[in-house]
Every structure is written in C-alpha cells, then in structure tokens.
Image (spheres, rainbow, N blue to C red):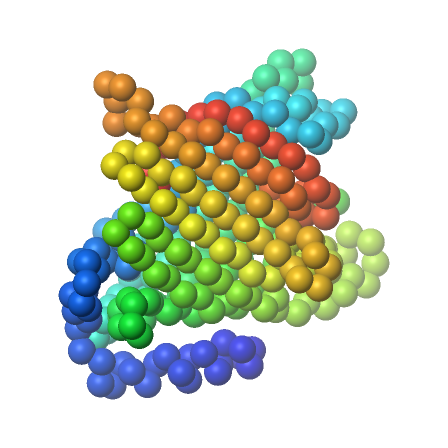
Amino acid sequence: MPKTLLIVLLLLLPGLAWAEEPSLNLGGDYSLPLPEAPQEGGLAGFEPNYLLLWSHSSKTGPLRLAQEASFQLSLQKVLTQVRGYEVIGAYTQNSFWQIYNQENSRPFRETNYAPQLFVKTPVWGLGFPVRLETGYIHQSNGGDLENSRSWDRVFVGVYHQGEHWKLHHRVWNRLDEDPQAYPQDPKGDENPDIQEHYGNQEGQFQFTLERHALFLKERYNPVTQQGMFEVMANGPVPGSSLQWMAYYLNGYGESLADYDQTLTKWGIGVIFSP
C-alpha cells in the first residue's frame, strides 16, 4: 500500500471506533448535506451530467474536425456506511463524438473511463463544516496499443458547502508503473509524463442561485506550471426539466489522448444534473 494512502487511512479510520452519526446542524445555516450524497443503495450524480451538442476545438487532425459533440455521465453510490463513514463507488465517462464529420461516418474519436472508490468522513465542525475523503481512481481510454492511455492514483480531498455553493479539492499521487521495455509494450507505462501536464491536484467550485449555476474546475502542476481550466454555466430551459449550458476549456488533458497537448474548446449544450 502506498505510504500516502496508508498515512491518511491511519488518520481517518480510527474514528470508526467512536464516531457518532453526524449532526448537520453545526451552528449557522448549515442544514444541507455535504455534498448532496446518495442514500445507501441509491444512485446520485457525482460530477455534472451533460450533453455538449456543439463545440469548437482549436485542435484538428486528418480524422478530427474542430466541431464535435461530447457528453459526460457521472454517478456515485454509497456501498456501505459505518458510524457516519461512507464507502462510495463512483464512475465518470467522457465521450467525444465527431457527429459533424459525415465523410468519416461520424465516429466516436475517444471515450475516457474513470471508476473510483473512496472513503468519506462524517461532517467535521472545524469552525465550518467539512468532510474529508481518501481513495483510489483509475482512468483509461480503452484504446489500442498505439493510442492506449491509462494511469492509477491515490488521493485525499476535502468538501465544504455553504447555502449556495460547494467546494471540492483533491491532491493525488500517481502509482508507479514499470517503463516500457519496447515501443507499445502492453505491460509498460504508456504515458510516464502525464502528471506533468495533467496536474497533481484538482479544485472544483460551484455557485448556485435558484436554477442558475456556475461550475469551475482547475487542474495544475506547480512544478511544470501546466494544467487546465474549465467553466460551465447553466440555467433553466423554459417548459423543460433540462437546463441550457455554456462551456469553455483551456489547457491540457481535455481527453487522455490530448494529455500532453494544450487546446481551447468552447460550446453549448444541455445539462441533466449539476
């Protein structure tokens, strides 16, 4: 077990022996759960679920038009709960669809998969309510040997939520892999420098006012000074339960195939859950 994860588990798990069910009334207006977690046995949204109907990217290629559609599906489920500590499984999928590329039969150019498993603490009142987490995430694109990308990480994170906003921040450590013995070695590391470009931490901030929301995400590696910045804004669609969304991204790691290339992308679509 990596030392980072072992140390965090030693800090968090002893509370299982004595922790009581958390009270969400910590003084002040903190009556909301942190975050809006699913009940045990049920499914709930994790990151935003959306369909980007049209987008324009600064990166193109022989089989890649600047215009495409994409969507994100992201769910979480409480697997078990012990004295307020939750073991949660989550899954996020990002698919990039060249639907406007009629000459090449409108292919999906890439799909990224990110299952994860983590433990979340009860609400801790440290002058303000927070929840801590520690866990493991795998991310890959299921590509062939030439285009395959994957990596595994352990992470620690913190949640904090107010009346109209949520803050979620994670730092991670990549699990080492053996280098490739030869080009396209299926047992070797396919992307040894991914953390230099993709970043070694991620912050998310969401501000909600009635049915309007602003969602910000950043990833950054302070050593290489590379990362990514993403913005989503959404509001109600009249006569519908859907919401419109406007999207902007700049930096590295839009998809795993682009982990070492920077690009700018913007578009419009609909969002199903914030």
Residue 7: x percent and y percent?
48, 82
In this view, 139 is above or below 179: above
Instruction: Say which residue appears at 32% left-offset and 85% top-offset.
Output: 14
Residue 114: x percent and y percent?
50, 51
Residue 274: x percent and y percent?
35, 41
Instruction: Say which residue appears at 64% left-offset and 51% top-offset.
Output: 227
**The image quarter in which residue 152 lies:** bottom right
Instruction: Say which residue appears at 43% left-offset and 50% top-offset.
Output: 205
**The image quarter in which residue 65 lies:** top right
> Does any portion of residue 14 appear in the rendered image?
yes
Task: Report the side of 138 relative to 38 (left or right).
Answer: right
Task: Report the side of 173 relative to 53 (left or right).
Answer: right
**The image quarter in which residue 79 lies:** bottom left
> Does any portion of residue 256 appear in the rendered image?
no
In this view, 158 is above or below 112: below
Residue 76: x percent and y percent?
34, 52
